[in-house]
Image (cartoon, rainbow, N blue to C red):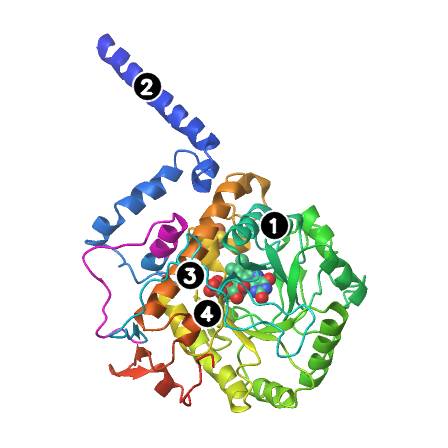
C-alpha cells in the first residue's frame, strides 16, 4: 500500500514538473500569443483544431457554416500567413450545386502563362489607376498594391497589433489606413499611411472637437501619409458614429484623442465641418489644395440619392473625390449595437454596383479609384469585386486573423485573448510585432498571388481586366447568372479602359 502511494506521488510530481515546463516554455515562446497569454490551457485550442476535421465528421458544424469567416476562410488566411501555397486535397467540400450566391469564376480556354517579371516572392500587383491624377493633385500616386490594410483605429486595436500591421504593410509594400482614432507611435513603424478623418476629427481637431486645418497639417508632417480619407460611415455601424468602450481608453489613447481616461468615447453620427454633398466637396477641395494630397471618402451604402448627386456634381469636373471606399454592411467593427451590425446598410455585392453605376452613367468611372471592404480579403470574393469595377480591396479582419485573431468576437470587451483588439498590456504581451508583421505581409502577398493567378486563369493579366461577364453567382432559384446581368451593367463597365 505504502509503495503504491509513493508511486502515485512520484507520477504526480513528474506530471507537475511537465506542466510547469510547458507553462514556462509557453510564457517565453513568441510565436503564439494565445499560449503566451494562456499557458498550458492554450494548447487545448490547437489540439481541438488539429482533430477538428475528424470531429466534424460526427458532430457540430461543417467547414462553411461559421460566420463572419467560415473555418475554410480562416484556414485559407492562416495558410497564407504561414507563407504556405494553400493547397488542399481531395476536391471541394462545398455544395457548389445549390448554395445561393455561390461564386463561379469562368476560366479561359487560353489562360495567360505565369509571368516571371511579376512572380517575385512579393507577387507585386500595382493598382491600374493613379489616385488623384484625374484632379491633378500635387501628390497623386499610383498605389503599389491592389490589396491594402483597411482603416482600423488605434484603441479598437492594441498598440502591438497596429505596429504589426504597419510593419507588415511596409514588408508587403502596401498602405495601412489609420482608422479614425488618430496616428499613434505604432503607426510610425515604416509603412505608408492613409490618414482617416472621422466625425471626431482625432488628429485634426481643436479643443472643442471641431476640425482644425493647422492640426491636420501638423499631423501630416509627422508621418508618411499618402492620402486622406474622410469617413462618412462604416458598414458595421452606419449612421451612428464611433464608440470606444471605457475599458479601452488608456492614458495613451486619451492623450492621442484629447479625451478623459477610462470613459467611453463617442464620436458624433455626422460631420460638423460640412452638411451636404455640396459643402462636403468644398471641404475636400480645400484639404486637397492645402495639403496637395489626394482625398477620398469611405462610406457604407444606404439611400441612393447621395451617390447620384455626388456623381452629378462631379460631372462638371470642378470639384470631386479622388477615391471612394465602399464598405459592405457585413463589415467589421470594434464595437456596435447588434441591429446596426446586422441590418443597417447594404451588403457589399448589392451596395457597390449602385455606386459604380452612378459614376459610370456620368462617364466618370475612370476618374475615380474604387476601393471596397467587407470580407473581400478572400480571393474569390475579391475577384468578384474587381469584376464589378473595384481597383483595390481593403482588408480589415482578415489582416487581424493573419496576426493571430481567432474570431472569438470579444473585441468590444477589451479582453481579446490574442492581444489583437485590446489595450491591456498583459494580454498584448503575447503578440510579438516582429513575428506577426511577417505573417501579415505573407497574407497580403498570398492574396495578391491568388488574385493574379485567378486573373490569368481568366485569360487576363490583372484583376482590373476581369469583366462582370467572367463571374457568375448562383441565384436563390438555383440558376446561374453573370454579375453583368444581375446588375444590368452596360458593355465595358467594370473593366479598366
Ligand atoms: C476592430 C475594428 C476597428 C475598425 N475601425 C475602423 C475605423 O476606425 N474606421 C473605419 O473606417 N473602419 C473601421 N473598421 C472597419 C474596417 O476598416 C472594414 O471596413 C470592415 O471591417 C470591412 O472589412 P473586413 O471585412 O475586411 O474586415 C474597423 C473594423 C474592425 C474589425
Ligand atoms: S481574437 Fe476575438 S476578441 Fe480578439 S480580435 Fe479576434 S475576434 Fe476580436
Mark 4 near mark 3, Cβ–Cβ under 8 Å?
Answer: no
Q: In terms of secondary structure, where does tag 3 sit? A: helix
> Which of the labelled discs sits on residue 448, or is there none?
3
Question: How far separated are the C-alphas under marks 3 and 1?
Answer: 21 Å
Mark 2 near mark 3, Cβ–Cβ under 8 Å?
Answer: no
Q: In terms of secondary structure, where does tag 4 sit? A: loop
Q: Which residue is mark 4?
A: 330
Ligand 1 within 8 Å of disc 4? The answer is: yes
Q: Which residue is mark 1?
A: 190
Question: How far separated are the C-alphas under marks 1 and 2?
Answer: 48 Å
Identify the residue shown where x is 22% and y is 62%: 93
Question: How far separated are the C-alphas under marks 4 and 1?
Answer: 30 Å
Residue 382 visible, this angle: yes
**Tag 3 or tag 4, which sits nearer the N-term?**
4
Name the residue nearer the viewer: 292 or 232: 292
Q: Tell me which secondary structure the magenta stretch mostly adopts.
A: loop
Q: Does the stretch in magenta take in 96?
A: yes
Q: In terms of secondary structure, where does tag 1 sit? A: loop
Q: Quadrant of residue 470?
A: bottom left
Residue 414 visible, this angle: no
Query: At which x and y percent is residue 455?
Result: 36, 69
Q: Which residue is mark 2?
A: 14
Q: In the drawing, does residue 340 fall left or right of residue 263?
A: left
Region of the chain picked out in magenta, as a range: 74-100
Amino acid at each position: 500500500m505504502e509503495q503504491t502511494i509513493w508511486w502515485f506521488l512520484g507520477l504526480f510530481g513528474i506530471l507537475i514538473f511537465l506542466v510547469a515546463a510547458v507553462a514556462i516554455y509557453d510564457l517565453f515562446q513568441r510565436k503564439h500569443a494565445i499560449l503566451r497569454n494562456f499557458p498550458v490551457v492554450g494548447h487545448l485550442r490547437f489540439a481541438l483544431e488539429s482533430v477538428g476535421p475528424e470531429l466534424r465528421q460526427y458532430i457540430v458544424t461543417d467547414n462553411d457554416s461559421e460566420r463572419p469567416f467560415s473555418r475554410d476562410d480562416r484556414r485559407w488566411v492562416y495558410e497564407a500567413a504561414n507563407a504556405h501555397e494553400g493547397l488542399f486535397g481531395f476536391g471541394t467540400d462545398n455544395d457548389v450545386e445549390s448554395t445561393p450566391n455561390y461564386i463561379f469564376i469562368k476560366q479561359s480556354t487560353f489562360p495567360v502563362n505565369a509571368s516571371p517579371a511579376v512572380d517575385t516572392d512579393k507577387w507585386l500587383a500595382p493598382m491600374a489607376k493613379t489616385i488623384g491624377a484625374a484632379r491633378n493633385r500635387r501628390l497623386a500616386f499610383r498605389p503599389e498594391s491592389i490589396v491594402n490594410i483597411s482603416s482600423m483605429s488605434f484603441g479598437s486595436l492594441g498598440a502591438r497589433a497596429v505596429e504589426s500591421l504597419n510593419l507588415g504593410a511596409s514588408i508587403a509594400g502596401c498602405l495601412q489606413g489609420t482608422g479614425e482614432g488618430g496616428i499613434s507611435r505604432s503607426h510610425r513603424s515604416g509603412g505608408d499611411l492613409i490618414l482617416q478623418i472621422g466625425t471626431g476629427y482625432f488628429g485634426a481637431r481643436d479643443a472643442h472637437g471641431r476640425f482644425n486645418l493647422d492640426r491636420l497639417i501638423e499631423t501630416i508632417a509627422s508621418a508618411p501619409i499618402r492620402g486622406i480619407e474622410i469617413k462618412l460611415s462604416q458598414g458595421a455601424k452606419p449612421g451612428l458614429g464611433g464608440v470606444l468602450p471605457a475599458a479601452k481608453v488608456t492614458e495613451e489613447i486619451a492623450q492621442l484623442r484629447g479625451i478623459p481616461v477610462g470613459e467611453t468615447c463617442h464620436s458624433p453620427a455626422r460631420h460638423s465641418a460640412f452638411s451636404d454633398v455640396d459643402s462636403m466637396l468644398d471641404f475636400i477641395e480645400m484639404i486637397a489644395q492645402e495639403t496637395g494630397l489626394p482625398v477620398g471618402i469611405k462610406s457604407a451604402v444606404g439611400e441612393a440619392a447621395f451617390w447620384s448627386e455626388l456623381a452629378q456634381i462631379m460631372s462638371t469636373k470642378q470639384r470631386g473625390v479622388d477615391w471612394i471606399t465602399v464598405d459592405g454592411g457585413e463589415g467589421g467593427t470594434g464595437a456596435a449595437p447588434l441591429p446596426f451590425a446586422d441590418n443597417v446598410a447594404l451588403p457589399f455585392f448589392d451596395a457597390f454596383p449602385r455606386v459604380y453605376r452612378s459614376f459610370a452613367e456620368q462617364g466618370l468611372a475612370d476618374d475615380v479609384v474604387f476601393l471596397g471592404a467587407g470580407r473581400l480579403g478572400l480571393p474569390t470574393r475579391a475577384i468578384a469585386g474587381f469584376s464589378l469595377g473595384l481597383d483595390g480591396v481593403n482588408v480589415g479582419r482578415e489582416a487581424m486573423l493573419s496576426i493571430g485573431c481567432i474570431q472569438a468576437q470579444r473585441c468590444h470587451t477589451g479582453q481579446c485573448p490574442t492581444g489583437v483588439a485590446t489595450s491591456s498590456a498583459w494580454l498584448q504581451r503575447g503578440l510579438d510585432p516582429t513575428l506577426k508583421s511577417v505573417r501579415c505581409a505573407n497574407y497580403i502577398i498570398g492574396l495578391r498571388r491568388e488574385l493574379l493567378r485567378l486573373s490569368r486563369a481568366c485569360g487576363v493579366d490583372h484583376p482590373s481586366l476581369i469583366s462582370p461577364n467572367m463571374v457568375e453567382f448562383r441565384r436563390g432559384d438555383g440558376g446561374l447568372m453573370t454579375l453583368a446581368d444581375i446588375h444590368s451593367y452596360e458593355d465595358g463597365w467594370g473593366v479598366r479602359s
